Amino acid sequence: MLTQEEKKRSYFLDTKKRQPEIVKIIKNNLSKECAISVNNFRRYKIVTTMVMFYTKFDISNILKTDCRVTDMYKIVEIDDIFFSVVLLTSTKEVGGWKFAENISYKLQNKDISCRFDVGEITESVVSNVMNFLDNFLFDIKDSSGCF
């Protein structure tokens, strides 16, 4: 039986959930958007880049003003932590990093700290979305600038 302290340490990214649970929640919330991106990649070879932000505040207003009409974003709140996922259509990974850095700069001006990761959706991602999200979360956890 785990003690209260051990349970607290097993939580992932300041949520009250373990990492596999978080991946499952995010994947379920993104199922429609991921299906569209996967279809666009398989059928038309349209490149899509995923950007995931991890914040303690809802940043949907900032994302709404910076996303293009073709981009999709979804905010997933888990235990007062916000995972904001943006799918940038027709954008390579370099453009995704520029977008993420721009949003990060705007958040810093509002005293909101965030961590983010960027990855291009490829054929290997199409077959294993869970692993892709899993890697994103670990990269975010390991990145500098913790809360």
Image: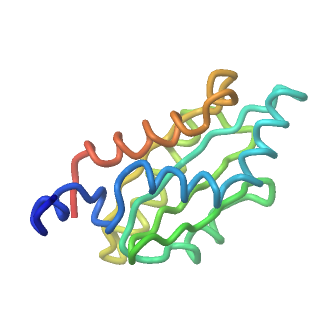
Image quadrant containing the C terminus: bottom left
Picture quadrant where residue 38 is located: top right
**Residue in front for this viewpoint, 65 or 41:** 41
- Residue at coordinates 34% horizontally, 55% vertically from top-left? 18
Q: Position of residue 93 (x, y in %)?
A: 57, 33
Q: In the shown orientation, is residue 10 left or right of residue 23?
A: left
Picture quadrant where residue 8 is located: bottom left
Determine the residue located farthest toward the front in the rendered image: 1
Give the answer, above or below, for where 49 lies relative to 69: above
Q: Position of residue 137 (x, y in %)?
A: 40, 46
**Residue in front for this viewpoint, 99 or 75:** 75
Q: How is this picture coloured? A: rainbow
- Residue at coordinates 73% horizontally, 32% vertically from top-left? 47
Determine the residue located farthest toward the top in the rendered image: 124
- Residue at coordinates 60% horizontally, 51% vertically from top-left? 27
Q: Position of residue 28 (x, y in %)?
A: 64, 56
**Residue in front for this viewpoint, 30 or 119:** 30
Please state the total of marks drawn on the protein image.
0
Image quadrant containing the N terminus: bottom left
**Residue in front for this viewpoint, 17 or 35:** 17
